[in-house]
Protein backbone atom coordinates (compact mmCIF):
# COMPACT_ATOMS: atom_id res chain seq x y z
CA UNK A 1 0.00 0.00 0.00
CA UNK A 2 1.28 3.44 -0.78
CA UNK A 3 0.97 6.44 1.49
CA UNK A 4 -0.27 9.33 -0.63
CA UNK A 5 -0.23 13.08 -0.27
CA UNK A 6 -3.38 14.02 1.56
CA UNK A 7 -3.28 11.04 3.89
CA UNK A 8 -2.54 13.26 6.89
CA UNK A 9 -5.73 15.17 6.05
CA UNK A 10 -7.65 11.92 5.65
CA UNK A 11 -6.42 10.80 9.06
CA UNK A 12 -7.47 14.13 10.57
CA UNK A 13 -10.93 13.84 8.98
CA UNK A 14 -11.32 10.36 10.43
CA UNK A 15 -10.36 11.66 13.86
CA UNK A 16 -12.95 14.41 13.53
CA UNK A 17 -15.68 11.85 12.83
CA UNK A 18 -14.72 9.87 15.92
CA UNK A 19 -14.81 13.03 18.01
CA UNK A 20 -18.13 14.22 16.51
CA UNK A 21 -19.79 10.89 17.30
CA UNK A 22 -18.30 10.71 20.81
CA UNK A 23 -20.93 10.93 23.54
CA UNK A 24 -18.45 11.15 26.42
CA UNK A 25 -17.86 7.54 27.46
CA UNK A 26 -19.18 5.79 24.34
CA UNK A 27 -19.37 6.52 20.62
CA UNK A 28 -22.46 6.23 18.41
CA UNK A 29 -22.00 4.69 14.92
CA UNK A 30 -23.64 7.72 13.27
CA UNK A 31 -26.20 10.35 14.19
CA UNK A 32 -29.88 9.57 13.44
CA UNK A 33 -29.68 6.02 12.11
CA UNK A 34 -27.79 4.49 15.09
CA UNK A 35 -28.01 6.74 18.18
CA UNK A 36 -26.75 4.24 20.82
CA UNK A 37 -23.68 2.14 21.59
CA UNK A 38 -23.19 -0.94 19.41
CA UNK A 39 -21.00 -3.77 20.60
CA UNK A 40 -18.56 -4.54 17.77
CA UNK A 41 -18.68 -0.99 16.44
CA UNK A 42 -17.45 0.25 19.81
CA UNK A 43 -14.58 -2.25 20.06
CA UNK A 44 -13.36 -1.46 16.55
CA UNK A 45 -13.80 2.26 17.25
CA UNK A 46 -11.35 1.95 20.13
CA UNK A 47 -8.72 0.90 17.58
CA UNK A 48 -9.13 4.29 15.93
CA UNK A 49 -9.31 6.25 19.17
CA UNK A 50 -6.02 4.82 20.43
CA UNK A 51 -4.20 6.80 17.73
CA UNK A 52 -5.11 10.11 19.35
CA UNK A 53 -6.23 9.27 22.91
CA UNK A 54 -5.40 5.90 24.50
CA UNK A 55 -7.31 6.62 27.70
CA UNK A 56 -10.46 7.31 25.68
CA UNK A 57 -10.00 4.05 23.78
CA UNK A 58 -9.91 2.00 26.99
CA UNK A 59 -12.98 3.87 28.28
CA UNK A 60 -14.95 2.97 25.14
CA UNK A 61 -14.54 -0.71 25.95
CA UNK A 62 -15.04 -0.31 29.68
CA UNK A 63 -18.39 1.38 29.04
CA UNK A 64 -19.52 -1.52 26.88
CA UNK A 65 -18.45 -4.09 29.47
CA UNK A 66 -20.14 -2.19 32.28
CA UNK A 67 -23.33 -3.52 30.66
CA UNK A 68 -22.27 -7.14 30.44
CA UNK A 69 -25.06 -9.42 31.63
CA UNK A 70 -24.64 -11.46 34.84
CA UNK A 71 -24.48 -14.63 32.72
CA UNK A 72 -21.50 -13.23 30.74
CA UNK A 73 -23.22 -12.07 27.54
CA UNK A 74 -22.19 -8.67 26.18
CA UNK A 75 -25.29 -7.20 24.50
CA UNK A 76 -25.32 -5.90 20.94
CA UNK A 77 -26.82 -2.49 21.82
CA UNK A 78 -26.64 -0.41 25.00
CA UNK A 79 -29.45 2.17 25.03
CA UNK A 80 -27.69 4.85 27.05
CA UNK A 81 -30.14 7.69 26.38
CA UNK A 82 -33.69 7.59 24.99
CA UNK A 83 -34.00 8.28 21.26
CA UNK A 84 -37.17 7.86 19.23
CA UNK A 85 -35.24 7.75 15.96
CA UNK A 86 -34.41 4.05 16.25
CA UNK A 87 -36.54 0.92 16.16
CA UNK A 88 -36.65 -1.54 17.95
CA UNK A 89 -35.96 0.41 21.12
CA UNK A 90 -35.80 -0.70 24.78
CA UNK A 91 -39.56 -1.31 25.19
CA UNK A 92 -39.52 -3.92 22.43
CA UNK A 93 -36.55 -5.77 23.91
CA UNK A 94 -37.81 -5.46 27.51
CA UNK A 95 -34.72 -7.12 28.94
CA UNK A 96 -34.95 -5.40 32.35
CA UNK A 97 -31.75 -3.96 33.79
CA UNK A 98 -31.13 -0.39 34.89
CA UNK A 99 -29.64 0.83 31.62
CA UNK A 100 -31.66 -0.94 28.93
CA UNK A 101 -29.83 -3.19 26.48
CA UNK A 102 -30.85 -5.47 23.64
CA UNK A 103 -31.02 -9.17 24.47
CA UNK A 104 -28.73 -10.63 21.81
CA UNK A 105 -25.02 -10.31 21.15
CA UNK A 106 -22.65 -9.43 18.27
CA UNK A 107 -19.34 -10.69 16.80
CA UNK A 108 -16.80 -10.85 19.65
CA UNK A 109 -14.00 -8.74 18.19
CA UNK A 110 -13.31 -7.55 21.76
CA UNK A 111 -10.49 -10.04 22.45
CA UNK A 112 -8.32 -9.23 19.47
CA UNK A 113 -8.98 -5.52 19.86
CA UNK A 114 -7.82 -5.67 23.49
CA UNK A 115 -4.66 -7.52 22.50
CA UNK A 116 -3.82 -4.84 19.96
CA UNK A 117 -4.57 -2.00 22.39
CA UNK A 118 -2.33 -3.67 24.95
CA UNK A 119 0.52 -4.87 22.74
CA UNK A 120 0.89 -1.61 20.83
CA UNK A 121 0.18 0.75 23.75
CA UNK A 122 2.38 3.79 24.20
CA UNK A 123 1.37 4.05 27.87
CA UNK A 124 2.32 0.58 29.11
CA UNK A 125 1.34 1.13 32.74
CA UNK A 126 -2.11 2.34 31.74
CA UNK A 127 -2.50 -0.61 29.38
CA UNK A 128 -1.53 -3.13 32.05
CA UNK A 129 -3.97 -1.68 34.56
CA UNK A 130 -6.89 -1.43 32.14
CA UNK A 131 -6.32 -4.78 30.44
CA UNK A 132 -5.98 -6.61 33.75
CA UNK A 133 -9.51 -5.59 34.68
CA UNK A 134 -10.91 -6.48 31.26
CA UNK A 135 -9.42 -9.96 30.79
CA UNK A 136 -11.76 -11.81 33.23
CA UNK A 137 -14.78 -10.10 31.64
CA UNK A 138 -13.70 -11.11 28.16
CA UNK A 139 -13.16 -14.64 29.39
CA UNK A 140 -16.67 -14.69 30.92
CA UNK A 141 -18.15 -13.66 27.56
CA UNK A 142 -16.23 -16.33 25.68
CA UNK A 143 -17.28 -19.01 28.17
CA UNK A 144 -20.86 -17.80 27.82
CA UNK A 145 -20.69 -18.47 24.08
CA UNK A 146 -19.66 -22.09 24.35
CA UNK A 147 -22.02 -22.82 27.27
CA UNK A 148 -25.09 -21.23 25.70
CA UNK A 149 -24.56 -21.32 21.96
CA UNK A 150 -22.90 -24.70 21.68
CA UNK A 151 -24.84 -26.79 24.17
CA UNK A 152 -23.87 -30.04 22.40
CA UNK A 153 -20.16 -29.22 22.60
CA UNK A 154 -19.42 -29.25 18.86
CA UNK A 155 -16.67 -26.62 19.16
CA UNK A 156 -18.63 -24.06 17.10
CA UNK A 157 -21.26 -21.60 18.33
CA UNK A 158 -24.58 -20.69 16.68
CA UNK A 159 -26.15 -17.30 16.24
CA UNK A 160 -29.87 -17.20 17.06
CA UNK A 161 -30.73 -13.97 15.25
CA UNK A 162 -29.35 -12.54 11.98
CA UNK A 163 -28.48 -9.31 13.83
CA UNK A 164 -26.04 -11.25 15.98
CA UNK A 165 -23.87 -11.93 12.93
CA UNK A 166 -23.34 -8.21 12.35
CA UNK A 167 -24.18 -9.04 8.69
CA UNK A 168 -27.88 -8.45 9.22
CA UNK A 169 -29.52 -9.33 5.89
CA UNK A 170 -26.85 -11.55 4.34
CA UNK A 171 -28.06 -14.09 1.78
CA UNK A 172 -26.63 -16.65 4.24
CA UNK A 173 -29.73 -16.31 6.42
CA UNK A 174 -32.45 -16.50 3.74
CA UNK A 175 -33.16 -20.22 4.03
CA UNK A 176 -33.16 -20.41 7.82
CA UNK A 177 -35.07 -17.15 8.17
CA UNK A 178 -37.81 -18.45 5.84
CA UNK A 179 -38.61 -20.97 8.58
CA UNK A 180 -39.27 -18.22 11.12
CA UNK A 181 -43.02 -17.52 11.35
CA UNK A 182 -44.56 -14.05 11.25
CA UNK A 183 -47.86 -14.73 13.02
CA UNK A 184 -48.36 -12.59 16.10
CA UNK A 185 -45.76 -9.95 15.24
CA UNK A 186 -46.95 -6.78 16.96
CA UNK A 187 -47.59 -3.81 14.64
CA UNK A 188 -44.49 -1.64 14.26
CA UNK A 189 -43.02 1.26 12.32
CA UNK A 190 -39.51 1.00 11.00
CA UNK A 191 -37.32 4.06 11.51
CA UNK A 192 -34.27 3.01 9.49
CA UNK A 193 -35.96 3.77 6.18
CA UNK A 194 -36.60 7.36 7.33
CA UNK A 195 -32.84 7.86 7.40
CA UNK A 196 -31.71 5.73 4.44
CA UNK A 197 -33.20 4.72 1.05
CA UNK A 198 -35.22 1.51 1.54
CA UNK A 199 -33.42 -0.03 -1.44
CA UNK A 200 -30.22 -0.02 0.65
CA UNK A 201 -31.83 -1.69 3.67
CA UNK A 202 -33.41 -5.09 4.56
CA UNK A 203 -36.93 -5.86 3.27
CA UNK A 204 -40.21 -5.78 5.22
CA UNK A 205 -40.47 -9.58 5.06
CA UNK A 206 -37.08 -9.85 6.76
CA UNK A 207 -38.02 -7.28 9.41
CA UNK A 208 -41.17 -9.22 10.37
CA UNK A 209 -39.03 -12.26 11.06
CA UNK A 210 -36.36 -10.31 12.92
CA UNK A 211 -39.11 -9.07 15.23
CA UNK A 212 -40.78 -12.44 15.64
CA UNK A 213 -37.49 -13.78 16.99
CA UNK A 214 -37.14 -10.86 19.41
CA UNK A 215 -40.69 -11.44 20.67
CA UNK A 216 -40.07 -15.17 21.04
CA UNK A 217 -36.93 -14.61 23.13
CA UNK A 218 -38.72 -11.98 25.18
CA UNK A 219 -41.49 -14.50 25.94
CA UNK A 220 -38.79 -16.82 27.27
CA UNK A 221 -37.63 -14.09 29.63
CA UNK A 222 -34.26 -13.77 27.84
CA UNK A 223 -33.09 -16.90 29.65
CA UNK A 224 -30.02 -17.85 27.63
CA UNK A 225 -30.15 -21.40 28.94
CA UNK A 226 -33.41 -21.81 26.97
CA UNK A 227 -33.00 -19.63 23.92
CA UNK A 228 -30.80 -21.87 21.80
CA UNK A 229 -33.05 -24.90 21.66
CA UNK A 230 -36.21 -22.78 21.42
CA UNK A 231 -35.01 -20.82 18.39
CA UNK A 232 -36.08 -21.85 14.88
CA UNK A 233 -33.01 -19.94 13.70
CA UNK A 234 -29.68 -21.51 14.74
CA UNK A 235 -26.89 -20.88 12.27
CA UNK A 236 -23.18 -21.60 12.62
CA UNK A 237 -21.47 -18.72 10.83
CA UNK A 238 -17.81 -19.35 9.93
CA UNK A 239 -17.10 -15.61 10.08
CA UNK A 240 -18.51 -15.23 13.56
CA UNK A 241 -16.70 -18.35 14.79
CA UNK A 242 -13.41 -17.23 13.26
CA UNK A 243 -13.71 -13.91 15.09
CA UNK A 244 -14.38 -15.75 18.36
CA UNK A 245 -11.44 -18.09 17.78
CA UNK A 246 -9.09 -15.22 16.94
CA UNK A 247 -10.26 -13.38 20.06
CA UNK A 248 -9.72 -16.49 22.16
CA UNK A 249 -6.15 -16.74 20.80
CA UNK A 250 -5.64 -13.12 21.75
CA UNK A 251 -7.06 -13.86 25.19
CA UNK A 252 -4.46 -16.62 25.63
CA UNK A 253 -1.68 -14.10 24.93
CA UNK A 254 -3.14 -11.47 27.22
CA UNK A 255 -3.88 -13.90 30.03
CA UNK A 256 -0.35 -15.31 29.83
CA UNK A 257 1.15 -11.82 29.90
CA UNK A 258 -1.01 -10.65 32.81
CA UNK A 259 -0.77 -13.73 35.02
CA UNK A 260 -4.15 -15.42 34.47
CA UNK A 261 -2.89 -18.97 33.99
CA UNK A 262 -6.28 -20.67 34.34
CA UNK A 263 -7.96 -18.36 31.83
CA UNK A 264 -5.14 -18.96 29.34
CA UNK A 265 -5.39 -22.72 29.70
CA UNK A 266 -9.18 -22.81 29.17
CA UNK A 267 -8.97 -20.52 26.16
CA UNK A 268 -6.25 -22.75 24.64
CA UNK A 269 -8.59 -25.74 24.87
CA UNK A 270 -11.45 -23.85 23.23
CA UNK A 271 -9.19 -22.72 20.39
CA UNK A 272 -8.01 -26.28 19.70
CA UNK A 273 -11.55 -27.64 19.65
CA UNK A 274 -12.87 -24.85 17.44
CA UNK A 275 -9.98 -25.14 14.96
CA UNK A 276 -10.66 -28.84 14.46
CA UNK A 277 -14.41 -28.25 13.99
CA UNK A 278 -13.94 -25.83 11.08
CA UNK A 279 -13.20 -28.70 8.68
CA UNK A 280 -16.92 -29.50 8.67
CA UNK A 281 -17.75 -26.09 7.16
CA UNK A 282 -15.33 -26.22 4.22
CA UNK A 283 -16.68 -26.39 0.65
CA UNK A 284 -14.18 -27.62 -1.90
CA UNK A 285 -16.48 -26.58 -4.77
CA UNK A 286 -16.89 -23.02 -3.48
CA UNK A 287 -13.27 -22.58 -2.34
CA UNK A 288 -14.50 -21.16 0.95
CA UNK A 289 -16.28 -22.01 4.18
CA UNK A 290 -20.10 -22.13 4.39
CA UNK A 291 -22.66 -21.53 7.11
CA UNK A 292 -24.28 -24.54 8.74
CA UNK A 293 -28.00 -24.59 9.46
CA UNK A 294 -28.18 -26.42 12.78
CA UNK A 295 -31.97 -26.85 12.69
CA UNK A 296 -32.04 -28.33 9.18
CA UNK A 297 -28.76 -30.18 9.75
CA UNK A 298 -27.04 -29.05 6.53
CA UNK A 299 -24.60 -26.56 5.03
CA UNK A 300 -26.13 -23.48 3.43
CA UNK A 301 -25.22 -22.94 -0.22
CA UNK A 302 -24.50 -19.22 0.00
CA UNK A 303 -21.10 -17.78 -0.84
CA UNK A 304 -20.68 -14.76 1.40
CA UNK A 305 -17.73 -12.99 2.92
CA UNK A 306 -18.57 -14.79 6.19
CA UNK A 307 -17.01 -17.85 4.60
CA UNK A 308 -13.80 -15.94 3.83
CA UNK A 309 -13.38 -14.42 7.29
CA UNK A 310 -11.66 -17.55 8.65
CA UNK A 311 -8.66 -15.88 6.98
CA UNK A 312 -8.58 -13.64 10.03
CA UNK A 313 -7.50 -16.58 12.17
CA UNK A 314 -5.44 -18.40 9.53
CA UNK A 315 -8.04 -21.17 9.39
CA UNK A 316 -8.11 -23.33 6.27
CA UNK A 317 -6.07 -22.95 3.09
CA UNK A 318 -5.11 -19.27 2.97
CA UNK A 319 -4.03 -19.53 -0.68
CA UNK A 320 -7.39 -20.97 -1.77
CA UNK A 321 -9.30 -18.35 0.18
CA UNK A 322 -7.12 -15.57 -1.25
CA UNK A 323 -7.87 -16.90 -4.75
CA UNK A 324 -11.61 -16.71 -4.01
CA UNK A 325 -11.24 -13.11 -2.85
CA UNK A 326 -9.46 -12.31 -6.14
CA UNK A 327 -12.08 -14.11 -8.25
CA UNK A 328 -14.82 -11.95 -6.68
CA UNK A 329 -12.73 -8.79 -7.03
CA UNK A 330 -12.26 -9.35 -10.77
CA UNK A 331 -16.01 -9.01 -11.27
CA UNK A 332 -16.35 -5.62 -9.55
CA UNK A 333 -14.52 -2.28 -9.32
CA UNK A 334 -13.81 -2.31 -5.58
CA UNK A 335 -13.21 -5.12 -3.13
CA UNK A 336 -14.27 -6.89 -1.09
CA UNK A 337 -17.96 -7.39 -1.94
CA UNK A 338 -19.90 -8.95 0.93
CA UNK A 339 -21.26 -11.63 -1.40
CA UNK A 340 -20.08 -13.50 -4.49
CA UNK A 341 -20.94 -11.18 -7.42
CA UNK A 342 -21.59 -14.22 -9.64
CA UNK A 343 -24.53 -15.29 -7.48
CA UNK A 344 -27.87 -14.16 -9.07
CA UNK A 345 -28.97 -13.11 -5.55
CA UNK A 346 -26.10 -10.57 -5.31
CA UNK A 347 -27.41 -6.99 -4.84
CA UNK A 348 -24.65 -4.36 -5.00
CA UNK A 349 -26.57 -1.71 -3.04
CA UNK A 350 -28.50 -3.69 -0.45
CA UNK A 351 -26.61 -3.68 2.84
CA UNK A 352 -24.98 -7.08 3.43
CA UNK A 353 -26.10 -8.66 0.14
CA UNK A 354 -23.25 -7.24 -1.92
CA UNK A 355 -21.78 -3.92 -0.70
CA UNK A 356 -18.23 -3.48 0.63
CA UNK A 357 -17.76 -2.85 4.35
CA UNK A 358 -14.51 -1.44 5.68
CA UNK A 359 -14.60 -3.52 8.88
CA UNK A 360 -14.62 -6.68 6.81
CA UNK A 361 -11.81 -5.39 4.62
CA UNK A 362 -9.80 -4.66 7.74
CA UNK A 363 -10.22 -8.18 9.13
CA UNK A 364 -9.53 -9.87 5.79
CA UNK A 365 -6.41 -7.82 5.08
CA UNK A 366 -5.13 -8.35 8.62
CA UNK A 367 -5.51 -12.12 8.29
CA UNK A 368 -3.97 -12.26 4.81
CA UNK A 369 -1.00 -10.18 5.92
CA UNK A 370 -0.30 -12.33 8.95
CA UNK A 371 -0.78 -15.62 7.13
CA UNK A 372 1.57 -15.35 4.20
CA UNK A 373 -0.44 -13.40 1.60
CA UNK A 374 0.85 -9.81 1.94
CA UNK A 375 0.15 -8.93 -1.71
CA UNK A 376 -3.50 -9.96 -1.43
CA UNK A 377 -3.72 -7.97 1.80
CA UNK A 378 -2.23 -4.89 0.14
CA UNK A 379 -4.82 -5.06 -2.68
CA UNK A 380 -7.66 -4.93 -0.15
CA UNK A 381 -6.06 -2.05 1.74
CA UNK A 382 -5.58 -0.13 -1.51
CA UNK A 383 -9.23 -0.65 -2.50
CA UNK A 384 -10.39 0.44 0.96
CA UNK A 385 -8.43 3.67 0.87
CA UNK A 386 -9.55 4.39 -2.69
CA UNK A 387 -13.16 4.03 -1.56
CA UNK A 388 -12.66 6.49 1.27
CA UNK A 389 -10.63 8.99 -0.72
CA UNK A 390 -13.21 9.11 -3.51
CA UNK A 391 -16.48 8.53 -1.69
CA UNK A 392 -15.98 9.58 1.95
CA UNK A 393 -16.60 7.75 5.22
CA UNK A 394 -19.81 5.90 4.39
CA UNK A 395 -21.43 2.99 6.19
CA UNK A 396 -20.93 0.78 3.08
CA UNK A 397 -20.17 1.09 -0.63
CA UNK A 398 -21.42 -0.27 -3.95
CA UNK A 399 -18.60 -2.55 -5.17
CA UNK A 400 -19.49 -1.98 -8.83
CA UNK A 401 -18.82 1.78 -8.79
CA UNK A 402 -17.93 2.81 -5.22
CA UNK A 403 -21.13 4.77 -4.54
CA UNK A 404 -21.44 5.69 -0.85
CA UNK A 405 -24.42 3.93 0.77
CA UNK A 406 -26.32 3.84 4.08
CA UNK A 407 -25.26 6.23 6.84
CA UNK A 408 -22.54 8.90 6.42
CA UNK A 409 -19.90 10.34 8.76
CA UNK A 410 -19.59 6.77 9.95
CA UNK A 411 -17.57 5.93 13.04
CA UNK A 412 -16.16 2.48 12.38
CA UNK A 413 -15.36 3.30 8.77
CA UNK A 414 -13.28 6.22 10.07
CA UNK A 415 -11.64 4.03 12.72
CA UNK A 416 -10.73 1.41 10.12
CA UNK A 417 -9.28 4.05 7.82
CA UNK A 418 -6.98 5.13 10.65
CA UNK A 419 -5.90 1.55 11.27
CA UNK A 420 -5.19 0.93 7.60
CA UNK A 421 -3.25 4.17 7.22
CA UNK A 422 -1.26 3.52 10.40
CA UNK A 423 -0.53 -0.06 9.30
CA UNK A 424 0.84 1.24 6.02
CA UNK A 425 3.15 3.59 7.85
CA UNK A 426 4.47 0.81 10.08
CA UNK A 427 4.99 -1.60 7.16
C1 LIG B 1 -25.94 -2.54 11.25
C2 LIG B 1 -24.83 -3.52 10.91
C3 LIG B 1 -24.17 -3.99 12.18
C4 LIG B 1 -23.67 -2.76 12.96
C5 LIG B 1 -24.78 -1.74 13.17
C6 LIG B 1 -24.28 -0.42 13.73
O1 LIG B 1 -26.94 -3.15 11.98
O2 LIG B 1 -25.31 -4.60 10.18
O3 LIG B 1 -23.12 -4.85 11.90
O4 LIG B 1 -23.14 -3.16 14.16
O5 LIG B 1 -25.42 -1.46 11.97
O6 LIG B 1 -23.33 0.14 12.89
Image (tube, rainbow, N blue to C red):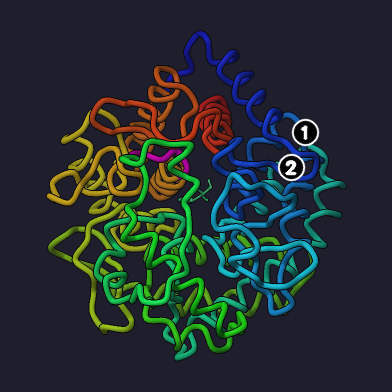
Of residues 350 and 59, the one nearer the viewer is: 350
Vertical position of residue 62 compared to residue 235: above or below: above
Determine which residue is flagged by label 1.
Answer: 53
Magenta highlight on residue 392: no
Q: Is residue 103 above or below residue 372?
A: below
Residue 75 placement: quadrant: bottom right
SS type, badge 1: loop
What numbered label is drawn on residue 57? 2
Count the numbered circles shown: 2
Query: Which residue is most to the front?
Result: 187
Is residue 159 among the parts visible in the rendering?
A: no
- In the drawing, does residue 18 fall left or right of residue 123? left
Q: For this view, does 162 lie left or right of residue 17?
A: left
Q: Is residue 208 left or right of residue 287?
A: right
Q: Is residue 122 above or below residue 235?
A: above
Residue 356 belongs to magenta span: yes
Q: Residue at x 50, y 29 (%)?
A: 408
Q: Which residues are magenta?
A: 355-359
Pinpoint residue 229: horizontal percent, then vertical percent.
45, 88
Give residue 385's quadrant in the image.
top left
Q: Mark 2 and ligand 1: say if the CB distance to the nearest ligand atom is below 8 Å.
A: no
Residue 11, which numbered label? none
Quarter holding the N terminus is top left
Q: Residue at x 73, y 29 (%)?
A: 52
State left or right for residue 416 relative to residue 56: left
Find residue 174 and report its horizontal and vertical position in percent.
27, 64
Nearest the viewer among 151 and 210 is 210
Question: Residue most toward the top?
Answer: 5
Query: Could you tell me if the residues under marks 2 and 1 are in contact, i.e. CB atoms within 8 Å?
Result: yes
What crowding class fits label 1: few (fewer than 14 Cα within 10 Å), some (14-19), or many (20 or more)? few
Camera-side residue of 129 and 272? 129
Amino acid sequence: MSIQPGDAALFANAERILRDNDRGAYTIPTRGLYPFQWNWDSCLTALGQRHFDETRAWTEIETLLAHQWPDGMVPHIVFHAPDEGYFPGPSVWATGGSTPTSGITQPPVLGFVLRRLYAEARDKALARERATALVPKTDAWHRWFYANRDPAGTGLVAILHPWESGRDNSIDWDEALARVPTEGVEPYHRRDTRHVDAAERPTEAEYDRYLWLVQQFRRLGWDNAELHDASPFQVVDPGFNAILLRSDEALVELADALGFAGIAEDARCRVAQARAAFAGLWSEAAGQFLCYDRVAGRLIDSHSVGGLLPLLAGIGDTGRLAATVRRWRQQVAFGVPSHDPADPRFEPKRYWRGPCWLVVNFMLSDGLKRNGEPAAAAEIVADSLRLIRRHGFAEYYDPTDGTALGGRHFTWTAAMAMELLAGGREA
